[in-house]
Amino acid sequence: MATAQKKPISTDKSPKAQEATALLKADHKAVDLLFQQYEAARSSTKKKALVSQICTELTVHAQIEEEIFYPPVQAELKDKELIPEAIVEHATLKDLIAQIEDGNPEDALYDAKVKVLSEYVKHHVKEEQNELFPKVKASKLDLYALGEQLAQRKEELMAKP
Ligand SMILES: [Fe+2]
Ligand SMILES: [Fe+2]
């Protein structure tokens, strides 16, 4: 009597699997929503909590892009412009984030700094999504594999105390 045939091990991508560009876009959208919530926030406690979330999200996002996404993209596209500019923009973002993290919602320039950060992030995101991502999508890079690496690293960094 033949034994029941075992189901083959599924090689399907898990439902959570997504392309690197989709994961990064989702991050961009999440931060944009947080900035919108900040605009509407009135209390210092609420502002402080949102800013802390925004800064964590942005710092982790920049780190996973720099560690996992930018290097293979730069190599594959033989890019000499977009990635170097993105790295410089990340450095400026990190400066602004450090200033904001050191400050308080009561400080005179606090709201202004958060506003400038949000505008700067918008500019950076626009360049990534309009200039870089289309080239990445058209390349031979395995975007699902990169997406998985990004997701894993993000989870690791977010879990940090
Ligand atoms: Fe970036
Ligand atoms: Fe990004």
Image: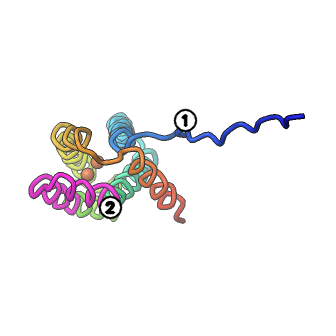
Q: Quadrant of the N terminus?
A: top right
- Tag 1 residue: 15
In the rendered view, would you say 131 is above or below 64? above
Placement of the C terminus among the 4 image quadrants: bottom right
Q: How many marks?
A: 2
Mark 1 vs 2, N-terminal side = 1
Q: Secondary structure at mark 1?
A: loop
Q: Is residue 102 above or below residue 40?
A: below
Instruction: State the separation of the CA atoms marked 1 and 2.
Output: 41 Å
In terms of depth relative to the viewer, which is nearer, 54 or 149? 149
Does the segment drawn in magenta span residue 47?
A: no
Quarter of image, res 78:
bottom left
Name the amino acid, label 1.
Answer: Pro
Q: Which residues are magenta?
A: 65-91
Q: Position of residue 44 (x, y in %)?
A: 41, 48
Q: Which residue is mark 2?
A: 103
Secondary structure under the numbered disc 2 in the rendered image: loop
Q: Residue at x 52, y 64 (%)?
A: 160
